Image (cartoon, coloured by chain):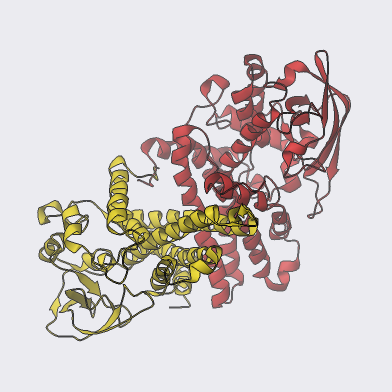
Chain colours: A yellow, B red
Amino acid sequence: MDFSFTDEQQELKREARRWLTERYPLDRDFEAEDDRWGELAELGWLGVSVPEEEGGAGLGFVEEAILLEELGYALYPGPYLATVGYALPLLGPEERMQVAAGETRWSVEIHGLVPWLGSVDLVEADGGTAYPAAGEELPTVDPTRPLGRLERGGGTPLPGKRSLPRMRAADACEAVGIAQRALELGIAHVSSREQFGRPIGVYQAVSHALADTYADVELARSLAYWAAWCVATGDEQAAVAAAAAKSFAAEAAVAACERSIQVHGGTGFTWEHPLHRFYKRALWLQGMGASPARLRAQVADLVLGSPVSV
Amino acid sequence: MDLHDTPAEAAFRAELRAWLEENLPADRRGLRGGEQRFDGSFGREWSRKLYEAGYAGLTWPEEYGGAGAPYSHQAIFLEETARAQAPAHVGVIGLGMAGPTIMVHGTGAQKERYLDRILSADEIWCQGFSEPDAGSDLAAVRTRAERHGETYVVNGQKVWSSFAHIADWCILVTNSDPDGKRYRNLTYLLVDMHAPGVEVRPLRQITGEAEFNEIFFSDVEVPVENRLDEEGNGWAVAMTTLMHERGTLGFALTAQLEVGVDRLLEVAREHGDGNALDRDRVAREWVELQALRYTNYRALTTYERTGVPGPEGSVAKLRWSEQNQRLTKLGRELRGTEGLLDDGWWHYQQLRSRGNTIEAGTSEVLRNIIAERVLGLPKSR
């Protein structure tokens, strides 16, 4: 068994961190965000798992998982999660080619709502039908991730199927990136902020909260990578692994942000500090699709048998 | 990234399964630990069998009698023995702590003298670190080692020492210079538990059993050749021991947890009424077990590359202990009123689990280690 990234995968992670840190610094203007879709296509991130003959890199979901974690870490605003994480398995060669080339953005309808409805081109709904994106968009807890009510018109059937494990594993990976960033912001603050003549990180009531966050993040990351590997290889445990990973990572991300806000004191509660944006992203991820409790009910059905719920 | 066994790992796993099937008597499976570990001569016999089959000291270098196998084989060994509910080698302190410490700090003669007998379980080791007034604060030990020519004369008291009542040797942290500088006044000795002046008194614990002991040292003479590393360098040696304690522990603990979670699933199927809250609690324990398992797998890569477990191992110990407390309480609770009975498993495990967040580094100390050594936060002292 080998549960580590290859040299190429590590390089991809480093490259993503470098590029995203430069394009999406924490002191950016969050009200005027650009998804840099064309640049993502040039980097090859949109076609990571698209076959080479369709203009992609011919890699797999582990590489996409690496990118999703980094996109979460940088609080990337665009519909990468919906296009690559959610919609890709539904698409045929033609549509995949357009995605890899950065020509189309996709989303899917979840519980009657469509993430990024106003900024994507096409939407999958009704069990495999593609519709042009149209309809009313509503603001959500995360200002970069609105949800819309689809107005159906001119539907065409899609060849593929949704993969719930893939969608959940993608959410989990983003959540791990969010949690990691919230932890790092907390560490930086308590190491420099002084009260009573000492950095507040010396106080165990403060430091132990961050130690607990670290433990949560490490466990969440392990589950997310496990789920990603299961999805990438079509492992029979993919469904249970993804439900486990999403439920754990989403709760870990929310808790990581809440603890980080707490140790930041009043600063963490301000609009000016970026922490609230990570917190809102974590809440969005937790709320998207099945809730952690529903996911655990599915885990219980899978490991205990005798389904009684969902 | 490939979570399947390599062909070599798969072969090792299959061979081990067959060996366990053939060599482990049915009535020795599923023991619940505690005093049962010390039951008659079986412990040593079983350990001897493991040694003869080459399963003791799997990751020890071949020059010290080990198999020189990769850490993944040790992980597989712990997984498979847990699944077969096989008893552990009785020499866990020797294998996981004394042995690796002697390999790092011992002289050629010391390695020659001790290592092979740890593997074969001919000699059992115990740990003499904690004292009544020095628990988490190990540097404050007061057990005195006074140099008289070629001998140290040892006086003092140690506590919470597992296996001491059956042990032949003790890794002992002593104070060799009461007026010396903190962290520079400790000396690490290898002490013969059969020497005159060593007295072991069992400590009865919350379970009613006596797994731990107090050890009293009264004018015990320890030859200077039994000192590990230099006089005054005991702190560094003790840190080697503790690093190995936590490093090798992760897989063993998770394997043990897997037995617990499997039993919890059985209890939930048998006694559960399908209520969503109980199912949620059971699912949480299953999820957290997987999280610990895959965290260990990730740590394995670092471990194999460097040969040294990182402080990240503290996460495994911290979360394992809290999970074991939750899940054993749940195992009792799901059985309703019947759960009050001493069923031979849950009753013992639930009470025993209260020690998990205290032994081998309290949860408070582990959180300090994570905060300071992993997160790099300013030191609290």
Is B354 rendered above or below residue A285? above
Is residue B104 something that shows in the picture? yes
Looking at the image, residue A130 lies above or below residue B17: below
Q: Where residue B22 appears, x then y in whole percent?
A: 56, 39
Task: Name the residue nearer the viewer: A181 or B210.
Answer: A181
The answer to which of B350 and B44 lies nearer the viewer is B350
Q: Is residue A63 left or right of residue B366?
A: left
Against A116, is B328 above or below? above
Residue reaching furthest to the front: A197
Q: Nearer the viewer, residue B130 or A21?
A: A21
Residue B370 appears left or right of A164: right
Q: Is residue B208 above or below residue B280?
A: above
Residue at 48% x, 37% y: name it.
Answer: B303
Q: Position of residue B177 (x, y in %)?
A: 79, 26
Picture residue at 42% right of the left edge, 69% below the top: A272
Quarter of the view holding residue B327: bottom right
